[in-house]
Amino acid sequence: MDVRIRPITGPELVDVLPGLARLRIEIFSGWPYLYEGDLHYETNYLREFSRAPDAIVVAALDGDDLIGAATASPMQAQSETFRAPFETRGIDTARLFYFGESVLYPEYRGRKIGHAFFDHREAQARKCGATAATFAAVLRPETHPKKPEGYAPLDAFWMKRGYRPVANMTTQLAWPEQGESEASVKTMQYWRRDL
């Protein structure tokens, strides 16, 4: 398998959004997100993301097939839900880049594609004048009944990249889990690193 990594910005973003919507639904259906995906919601969410100035999708392609992707855009382009934990602490979000999803089919993992996702997003953040990057990851209890046996969280990978969890900085997001008819609230932990 010959995987190409392609950073995409500007008007070309719209071309990759349908594939990214399907990829998000499929990958996030697994642990720890357990997302009950909705293509209509995904389409609207990603359309709004693509309008953010300086937004980037880092696409991983096997031939013409999108097999993974990661997104990022300036924190000021994010909703208040994402900005508020920083703004209430007096942190200047104008110098902060937000890294959204990073999704990759399991059979392609362990090939340094995740590192390429971070490399390209960090380069875009620096190019746009950001001095730090951040992302939020869902928190789940260790005793959650749906946690797969032998699951290894990505914490060690993120720490190797220089990211650290920000003490007492979380936000709340709601989405429907598999088997739920309504969205339920989850806590998301922020991670951050200086660029």
Image (spheres, helix red, strand yellow):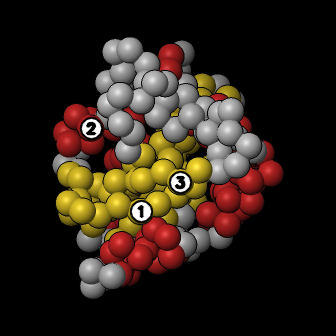
Cα–Cα span, label 3 and label 2: 22 Å
Mark closer to the observer (3, 2)? 3
Q: Is residue 174 left or right of residue 92?
A: right
Cα–Cα span, label 3 and label 1: 10 Å
Cα–Cα span, label 1 and label 2: 18 Å
Residue 82, position in %: x, y? 46, 68
Q: Is residue 65 above or below residue 182?
A: above
Q: Is residue 128 above or below residue 43?
A: below
**First in residue order: circle 3 vs circle 2:** 2
Q: Is residue 37 left or right of residue 161?
A: right
Q: Which residue is mark 2?
A: 155
The 10 Å Cα crowd at callout 2, few under 14, some 14 to 19, many 20 or more, is some
- Amino acid type of the residue that numbered disc 3 sits on in the rendered structure: Val
- Does the rendering let one see residue 180? yes
Q: Which residue is mark 3?
A: 185
Instruction: Tell me what residue is drawn at x 51 percent, y 76 percent.
Output: 80
Label 3 residue SS: strand
Q: Quadrant of the C terminus?
A: bottom left
- Find out whether the residues at labels 1 and 2 contact each other: C-beta distance under 8 Å: no
The 10 Å Cα crowd at callout 1, few under 14, some 14 to 19, many 20 or more, is some
- Amino acid type of the residue that numbered disc 2 sits on in the rendered structure: Asp
